[in-house]
Image (cartoon, helix red, strand yellow):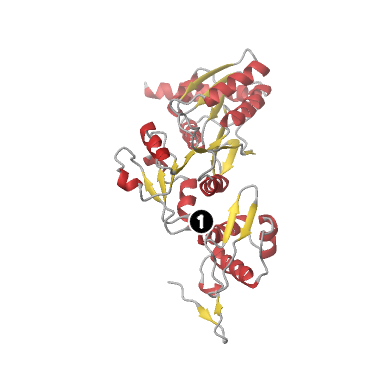
């Protein structure tokens, strides 16, 4: 438990930073002191300028700002910046409306999404958030304890979504557009990213494409088809899942575009197990989100940007017209794509490896 210390005149003093083990915690207290003294007020300088001022990296600064925003000391909004909230006469911070004790978030996700980077950031921001991986048995009495719902799951029923809207709850869908009912959504613009990736690969000479998407999704393959109509009408694309990519390589496909970071990781690992070199034998690209080291080249939205966008809709969505925000992401070059000539040079190596493998199996 944190204990507040006082100076000789009895005024409260921030906890000493030396007792805090993590760099972002020490920075958080420095920022708190700067706000209390009036050194920082109103709209804060840009994050790059703040990081340089306090001699820290962007990730450390972001964690410290996120903590202070969670306490209600700061208000962070994408497109507007970061602001210091008003304080009362006794020196305490007046919490923002979305930080009230009763503002609990219900996060719906599939079992394999519990470690999703965006989900973890949302939990860090609001420790009161509750994660549910099975929405089929949620009771009305349980739902009444929440003011907002963040839905990552592709399996949430339309009946439940309708019930949430009727209850007047703020609903934010993540990674999918509203299909029937008006609600907020944060969506990666996979169509745009896939179009750019397909264009570059087509101009690099590729003509055999494989679109790796989740079941029921067609965004990537449709974007590839549109690019083919413009840049190479003789090209061909086929849809499939991560488990189909080895057979696709055997049939001559050279360009693989995935609809998510996770899908790209599965495809990359499949190629590695079979000795298929990237980009020596095939090109691999993806559209997705996350942080850290991405599995391949592509257009990626940083997890923190995605989480901040969700929180922006939670703050501003109540009582306003539902909004869908599209995130385009930035291009990341991981060296996993190459012109078709490079693949043709390596094709004999792959074929020899398959022949050897087949001979051993016999």
Judge from the rendering whether residue 238 lies leftward or rightward of residue 358; answer left or right. right
Residue at x-position 61% and y-position 19%:
226
In the picture, residue 253 is in which quadrant?
top right
Q: Nearer the viewer, residue 237 or 145?
A: 145
Judge from the rendering whether residue 165 lies leftward or rightward of residue 290; answer left or right. left
Residue at x-position 54% and y-position 84%:
10
Query: Where residue 337 sits in the image (x, y, percent)?
Result: 62, 31
Q: Nearer the viewer, residue 34 or 142?
A: 142
Q: Nearer the viewer, residue 19 or 245?
A: 19
Query: Where residue 96 sits in the image (x, y, percent)?
Result: 53, 58
Judge from the rendering whether residue 149 lies leftward or rightward of residue 220; answer left or right. left
SS for dot 1: helix
Task: Confirm whether residue 110 shows in the render.
Answer: yes
Query: Where residue 181 sits in the image (x, y, percent)?
Result: 46, 32
Residue at x-position 59% and y-position 22%:
224
Reply above or below: 162 against 216: below
Reply above or below: 313 against 96: above
**Quadrant of the snapshot with the N terminus:** bottom left
Query: Where residue 57 sits in the image (x, y, percent)?
Result: 63, 58
Reply above or below: 56 against 303: below
**Quadrant of the snapshot with the C terminus:** top left
Few, some or many C-alpha atoms within 10 Å of disc 1 (few <14, some 14-19, many ≥20)? Answer: few
In the picture, residue 341 is in which quadrant?
top right
Residue at x-position 56% and y-position 21%:
222
Tag count:
1
Q: Nearer the viewer, residue 318 or 38?
A: 318
Toward the top, the furthest residue is: 234
Task: Confirm whether residue 280 shows in the render.
Answer: no
Residue behind mark 1: 97
């Amino acid at each position: 438990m944190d204990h507040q210390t006082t100076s000789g005149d009895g005024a409260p003093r921030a906890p000493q930073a030396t007792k805090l083990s993590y760099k972002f915690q020490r920075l958080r207290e420095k920022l708190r002191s700067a706000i209390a003294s009036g050194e920082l007020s109103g709209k804060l300088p840009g994050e790059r300028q703040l990081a340089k001022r306090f001699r820290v990296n962007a990730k450390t600064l972001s964690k410290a700002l996120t903590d202070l925003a969670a306490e209600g000391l700061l208000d962070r909004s994408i497109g507007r910046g970061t602001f210091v909230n008003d304080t009362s006469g006794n020196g305490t911070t007046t919490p923002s409306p979305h930080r009230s004790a009763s503002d609990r978030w219900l996060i719906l996700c599939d079992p394999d999404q519990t470690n999703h980077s965006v989900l973890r950031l949302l939990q860090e921001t609001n420790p009161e958030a509750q994660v549910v991986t099975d929405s089929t048995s949620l009771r009305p009495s349980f739902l009444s304890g929440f003011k907002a719902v963040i839905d990552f799951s592709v399996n949430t029923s339309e009946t439940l979504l309708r019930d949430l809207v009727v209850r007047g709850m703020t609903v934010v869908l993540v990674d999918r557009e509203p299909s029937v009912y008006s609600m907020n959504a944060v969506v990666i613009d996979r169509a745009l990213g896939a179009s750019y990736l397909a264009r570059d690969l087509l101009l690099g000479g590729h003509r055999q494409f494989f679109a790796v998407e989740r079941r029921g999704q067609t965004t990537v393959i449709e974007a590839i088809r549109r690019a083919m109509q413009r840049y190479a009408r003789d090209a061909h694309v086929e849809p499939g899942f991560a488990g189909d990519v080895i057979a696709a390589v055997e049939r001559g496909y050279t360009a693989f575009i995935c609809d998510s970071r996770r899908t790209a990781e599965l495809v990359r690992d499949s190629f590695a197990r079979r000795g298929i070199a990237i980009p020596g034998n095939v090109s691999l690209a993806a559209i997705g989100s996350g942080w850290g080291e991405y599995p391949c080249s592509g257009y990626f939205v940083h997890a923190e940007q995605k989480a901040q966008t969700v929180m922006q809709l939670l703050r501003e969505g109540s009582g306003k017209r539902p909004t869908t925000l599209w995130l385009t992401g930035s291009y990341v070059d991981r060296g996993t794509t190459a012109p078709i000539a490079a693949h043709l040079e390596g094709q004999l190596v792959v074929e020899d490896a398959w022949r050897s493998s087949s001979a051993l199996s016999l």
